[in-house]
Amino acid sequence: MQSSQHADTATSTDTGTGTGTDTGTGTGTDTGTGTDPATGPGPGPCHVVVIGGGISGLAAAHRLATAGARVTLLEATGRLGGKLQTGEIAGTPVDLGAESMLARRPEGIALARAAGLGDRLQPPATSTAAVWTRDALRPLPKGHVMGVPGSPEALAGLLSPQGVARIAQERELPPAELGEDVAIGAYVADRLGREVVDRLVEPLLGGVYAGDAYRISMRASVPRLFEAARSRPSLLDAVREVQRQAAAQQQDGPVFMGVAGGVGTLPDAVADAVRAHGGEIRTGTAVLGLSRSALGWQIRTDRRILTADAVVLAAPAWAAADLLAAESPAAAAELGRIEYASMALVTLAFRRSEVTGLPDGSGFLVPPADGRTIKAATFSSRKWRWVTEGSSDLFVLRTSIGRYGEEEHLHRDDADLVAVSLRDLGAAVGIAAKPVAHEVTRWIGGLPQYPVGHLARVARIRAEVAGLPGLRVCGAAYDGVGIPACIADGHRAADEILATPTLARGTDRGTGQ
């Protein structure tokens, strides 16, 4: 589930895949309209192939198509969207992946509007949440930055008295040297005590990265706090400075935004917009090889070879590594070192009359330190009006299970995951009813991890890729896992392609973005 503070998505988004089956017909070479096999680049629109049909690849394709490029998007699986997916449970539409996007970044809402979903944008009906820890549901506190408090009082009630007292001792400690990066869990534990990390930082970061706070890069996950902490002797003072900056930039409106019918409807809407601008989208099309030629780039699938002026590689890091192994071994080696976590979402539908007495709010987080199986629970019927409108006699909620290093539960069958979810829900909020329907969605190897040094690795990857004319990479593995961040990365890749002098000949910036 989301925290009401900082998380962008309930499951992190990704950018399509690089394996699958080609459903196209015929063999040979498809050179497109921008390249002629005999004479090389011609006067027509430049042809850009986008590899990967997650939200980053779709955003790049949309940016390119609206600028006048000829776009072909290839997605290995049979559907678009990566970790954005909708489904039904007991006839009610639900998100089976990410469920909302950060509204205070413009990219997600802007793309939804451009794709015709503006009238379906919908904020959460409630933004309050709880933390299930120390055998009780405790209100998710305010006055923190991704779980790091600005004062001891901010976490009173969530932590033990000893944990609160430990925070108060922070200013007595000598200043810490952060260097170029540090694990946020280790640094915060050193300054404020492990209880802050275990009870709040860990579950909040888990909702974003499905990761381990003691491995996650502070510079990548909370960059403003990292920079503030580098210039101040006290972490508490650094938090207050970040809060002061945020207050000065306060925006009206909701922090998060969803889409009626599910955020998972966004990919198909963007795909339709790409097609409306002349783009072509091929699902079930695996890319097996990528190489430079005198004509630009050759993209090999299992049935044909496409030739393009440029390529946007929006596949997961492991797939991008395979495709770049020949052309850029150094970039491929760095990409191959990016690790991914797995998790499962268990969506449950109950008769509303049998689910009574639930606490207020949109759900609760569960710290791994408490030894429970579920990591969070979201009361979807309470959080999203459109879920209730889809079936007023049902109550839908979902739990999440698994994170980096704790994926053994994902080997259990669906019935077991439902059973352990019901067990923990019963202990947390007293649910004793049996669900009338359930859906288990497993995201295996889908959530990129941002360990210490991640941004330096991304810089090395981009430096190597910059040496490949007409090729750019984008996706959740680089600069952010939330929907707006992935869209922004797709836009960046597209804009860099469009700015290439030899390619700009065939685009029309006047057609809109």
Image (cartoon, rainbow, N blue to C red):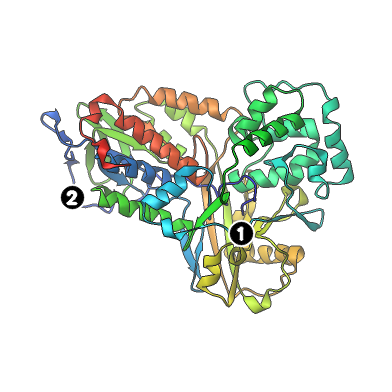
Residue sitting at x 75%, y 37%: 150
* Crowd rating for badge 1 (residues with CA inside 10 Å; few <14, some 14–19, many 20+): few
Q: Is residue 79 visible?
A: no
Q: Which mark is residue 195?
A: none
Q: What percent of the width, then of the height, locates residue 295?
A: 20, 29
The amino acid pointed to by label 2 is Gly
Q: Quadrant of residue 487?
A: top left
Q: Which mark is residue 26?
A: 2
Residue sitting at x 41%, y 41%: 315
Residue under label 1 = 412
Residue sitting at x 48%, y 25%: 459
Seen in the picture, residue 70 relative to 124 is either above or below; the reply is: above
Residue pushed farthest left? 38
Relative side of 486 to 19, left or right = right
Relative side of 54 to 458, left or right = left
Does dot 2 land on a helix, a strand or a loop? Answer: loop
Residue sitting at x 81%, y 57%: 135
The amino acid pointed to by label 1 is Arg
Does dot 1 land on a helix, a strand or a loop? Answer: loop
Seen in the picture, residue 390 relative to 494 is either above or below; the reply is: below
Front-most of residues 249 and 233: 249
Contact between marks 2 and 1 (CB within 8 A): the answer is no
Front-most of residues 255 and 230: 255
Q: Calculate the distance from the C-alpha at mark 2 to the C-alpha at mark 1.
A: 42 Å
